[in-house]
Image (spheres, rainbow, N blue to C red):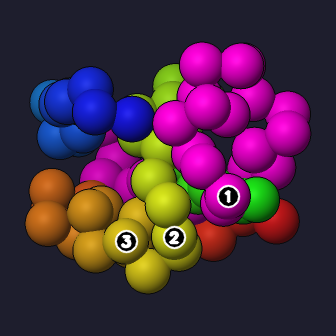
Amino acid sequence: MTENFDIKAPEGDAPLVYVRPVEVADLPEAVRAEAGDVETLYALHRPNGQQLALVRDRKLAFVLARQNDLTPVSVH
């Protein structure tokens, strides 16, 4: 979770990013170890499904998207 990501929208892409909850138990062991006692993380995805980032809370996911000129949309 210390890796940097370029989450700017590529030229011609819609400036949307989808935010969805991810159960830590469903993630690889290395990510689970870094998550500590957190049970749910939030993934940011491009419209094509590419995962851009994984963050600790929903509010942070929305802030991260907006800081990168993207429009966050919740996915359930």
Which region shows up in magenta?
12-38
Classed neighbour count for the residue bearing mark 1: other residues with Cα under 10 Å, few (<14), some (14–19), many (≥20): few
Question: Residue at the spot x=71%, y=19% of the render?
Answer: 29
Marks 1 and 2, how far apart in space?
Answer: 13 Å
User: Mark 3: which secondary structure?
Assistant: helix
* 12 or 65, nearer to the observer: 65
* Disc number placed over residue 60 in the picture, else none: 3
Mark 1 vs 2, N-terminal side: 1
Identity, as a three-letter code, of the amino acid under mark 2: Asp
Question: Residue at the spot x=85%, y=39% of the render?
Answer: 25
* 55 or 10, nearer to the observer: 55
Q: Is residue 6 placed above or below 64 in the rendered structure?
A: above
Q: State the residue position of label 1.
A: 37
In the image, farthest residue toward the bottom: 59
Q: Where is residue 2 in the image (x, y as percent from the top left)?
A: 28, 33
Marks 1 and 3, how far apart in space?
Answer: 17 Å
Question: Residue at the spot x=50%, y=61% of the render?
Answer: 56
Q: Position of residue 27 (x, y in %)?
A: 75, 29
Image quadrant where residue 61 sits? bottom left
Q: State the residue position of label 2.
A: 57
